[in-house]
Image (tube, rainbow, N blue to C red):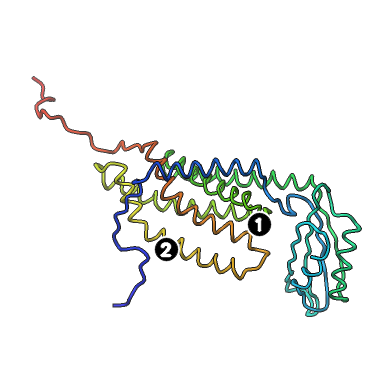
Amino acid sequence: MAWRLRLVPTTTNINFFKAQWVTFGASIFAMVASLVLIFTMGLNFGIDFRGGTTIRTEATSPVDIGAYRDALNTLELGDVSISEVFDPSFDADQHVAMVRISAREGEESVTPELIAEVEAALVAVDPSITFPAVESVGPKVSSELVTSALLAILAGTIGILFYVWVRFEWQFAVGTVAALVHDVLVTVGIFALFQIRFDLTIVAALLTILGYSVNDTVVIFDRLRENLAKYKQMPLREMMNLTANETLSRTIMTASTTLISLVVLLIFGGDVIRGFVFAMLLGVILGTYSTLYMAKNIVLMLGVDRGDKPKKTSKNEFADVEA
């Protein structure tokens, strides 16, 4: 018989409600602390939200992002992002990069003098470099991007709420959305605490977290719905524990395989996607936790309509017999 790796035993009997109020209280505390951090420390917005300038470069020699960055480090710049652009239509000796520079504190845009210094520093690295396009994003456009990002996250949450409500019951929808709000809010709070750059790629990560977390939660709720029909006399608390244990292997396997790929990307993926990967890493960990310890707690508090439960028969078998 072939040997198979098992991350958890075939049969488990973990009491996920043993520290019910401790885990639920920790989740509420983390959400409140995240709100406090966001409103007091604020987010370290990137170029997308703060405004800045994007310089497109072209050169006949290959792009050396490290050399570009070293050259720009000598200048007093704000947040700088450098990425190479790949396109099948490019010529063999056409090497393109995008240099994005955020506006300094107190300034609405990057000044022409500073742009000239950046171009001179890059030419010193590669004399063949040219600058076919220079585009600036002002604070007005940036504020619109912030609004659009918030609306995107809100729309995704409402869509998930409606889906779970239709597929299951409203108690399941409330528990799912509460878990999603927990995952997103705590992730953003950690970004505020450590002042990690927050840009549109992080918004994309938050939307991906919504999808990952709801997928994990729906799998457990789907099994719970099956058990509600199967075990009509079992108390809801015991049934939820049974359901979580039955799906635990799948939950751990999904989270583990996802975390392995994210850790590899975090180490070797480079600076361009590091923020996105870090947000996803937090989201997977928080999503697994909230599914097991928050969503189920809320459903248990709200209760589930078990109207299909058979009515108890009268103790007196002759009670309904007409005299």
Left or right, residue 311 beside residue 279:
left
Q: Position of residue 99 (x, y in %)?
A: 79, 64
Q: Which residue is mark 1?
A: 201
Left or right, residue 139 beside residue 112:
left
Q: Which residue occupies 36% across, 38% down?
A: 304
Q: Position of residue 305 (x, y in %)?
A: 35, 36
Left or right, residue 136 beside residue 174:
right
Kindly state the secondary structure of the residue where label 2 is placed. Answer: helix
Near-viewer residue (121 or 201)? 121
Left or right, residue 38 beside residue 78:
left
Location of residue 71 by image quarter: bottom right
Q: Position of residue 264 (x, y in %)?
A: 56, 69
Distance from the alpha carbon under mark 2 to that under mark 1? 26 Å
The local crowd at label 1, few if under 14, some if 14 to 19, many if 20 or more residues have their Cα within 10 Å, is: some
**Kind of residue at disc 1:** Thr
Q: Which residue occupies 54% across, 56% down?
A: 282
Q: Which residue occupies 72% across, 48% down?
A: 145
Vertical relation: 250 (above or below) 108: below
Q: Which mark is residue 279?
A: none
Kindly state the secondary structure of the residue where label 1 is placed. Answer: helix
Q: Which residue occupies 72% across, 54% down?
A: 46
Q: Which mark is residue 253?
A: 2
Q: Mark 2 or 1 closer to N-term? A: 1
